[in-house]
Image (tube, rainbow, N blue to C red):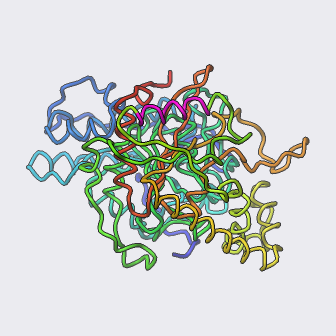
Amino acid sequence: MRLGGNPAREDGVLYRAGTGPLLTGQRRPHIMLETSSHALGSCMNKTDIPFLSASELSGLMAAKEVSPVEATEAYLERIESLNGTLHAYLTVTADEALEAAKRAEQEIAQGNHRGPMHGVPVAVKDQIYTKGILTTGGSPVFNDFVPTEDATVIANLKDAGAVLLGKLNMTEFATTGLSHQFDPPRNPWDLERSTGGSSSGSGAATAAFLCSSSLGEDTGGSVRFPASWCGLAGLRPTWGRVSRYGVMPGVRSMDTIGPLGRTVEDCAITLAAIAGHDPKDRLSSKEPVPDYRAALTGGIKGLRVGIVRELLYTDLVEEEVRRPVLAAADTLREMGAQVEELSIPLAADAAAIAGGIRVEAPVTYGELLRDRPRDIAHDNRIAYMVGSIMPAPYYYKGLRLRSLLRDQVLAALGGVDLLLSPTTGVAAQLLEPDPVIDRKGKGNRIPWLLTTTFSLANVPALSLPCGFTATGLPIGLQIAGRPFDESTVLRAGHVYEQNTDWHSRRPDI
């Protein structure tokens, strides 16, 4: 889909939220909510609704105990209260969300329940096209871009009956981990710290109970990274499992849409709503989509789990992170899994291999880089300029090394069912100025991000909480599996989650 244009905007559908440099004015718009009598009764205080998991909320809606309109109003009120601090949303679609919630309420009241996402309020990364709704890709370059068509994942969410609350903040073009053109989202666990990126707003909004679940996009780790730092479950599905039609590209051979939720079950029901072959995306897979929620049942006795040495015993992983990951492995062992250590030699070089392939991004945005370089933030501008002059043999060598790494990952998965590692080697870091190279000569390349191995191998990988630091910051456990075997990855994560209480902790916000 073409990136550009400025289709007419329909008044009353959207507003911009936050105080970023390209946001109109410095006043946060107020959300006007209508009061109405709901067709569905309520069994709880409306202000408590946002603290339910998506799965819990879904069950109450199906039982007609909570109204989709009530839930939507509760989320919108919470967004109004907190988004000025957290900067999670770039656009809030209040009127449109309330209309969708009313439709969902009527359908459920009439006995036409579509499934687990029906009436559930969600939000999506601003990289994903939404018809009639501003879509910036995290950059002022697209500050006037309003798509005339929904991305397939948006169409799928609507078909599932989900309620779209708005568009979430992100790093520019989704090709940097920490660099924002708009106000950077704040981590709900510590407002002075980063959420991780590039799906930064997805992490902040989901962790702060500003949406029930969210969609992010994961290239080198952009769903799992914020999931780890924000104490969430976040899944990168197998490449091709979810359509990318209508998604602004980052690095096309790695980009993958995935869910973030407060529980593994939330990820399972959100993924089920968006997965499947799409004729508009010829690279999407025709592999059958299982019932991910049903796959969560059962234990993990006899499941073979391999701890990747190169992603655990490295200076990039702090001891305060390593200990909880090893403790998580012990928990899986107690649940009946067979746990062993194994080696994937090229995993230690995954970030360098990906660096050679990132040339795809400056090719995508080559015209912009040539004609308007100053409109690109410093981090991306320098990386794109370097990538644009990279000799072709470097790129081909990166592709060859990627193929070898994928072979090693698949070989490892021939002997075990799942692979285990930390998601990141450190907990959430302080928000700092952007430059790709600071005064100490250190690059902003987040070397302690340990997700790239599975991105390059195009296999599914889940991050979920496995502990907290002494200062109360979440620590992420990463579980990867065979291509298109999201079911086993989710089942193992769910079993671990249900036997620990890390996912039940809430940030004080």
Residue at image point 16% right, 33% down: 65
Residue 37 against residue 471 in the figure, above or below? below
Location of residue 332 with respect to 449 vertically, above or below: above
Q: Position of residue 148 (x, y in %)?
A: 44, 70
In the image: residue 118, left or right of residue 343: left
Tag count = 0
Looking at the picture, tell me which residue is in the foreground, 33 or 269.
269
Residue 25 visible, this angle = no
Q: Is residue 294 left or right of residue 270?
A: left
Q: Is residue 326 left or right of residue 209?
A: right
Q: Position of residue 15 (x, y in %)?
A: 49, 48
Camera-nearest residue between 113 and 18: 113
Q: Looking at the rendering, which quadrant does residue 422 occupy?
A: top right
What's drawn in magenta, residue-wise?
322-333
User: Percent x, y for residue 193?
Assistant: 66, 32
Residue 374 shown in magenta: no
- Quarter location, residue 254: bottom right
Residue drawn 29% across and 68% down?
288
**Measured along the vertical axis of the image, is residue 509 above or below residue 251?**
above
Q: Residue at x 61, y 26 (%)?
A: 190
User: 497 or 444: nearer the eye?
Assistant: 497
User: Could one spot residue 285 in this view of the protein?
Assistant: yes
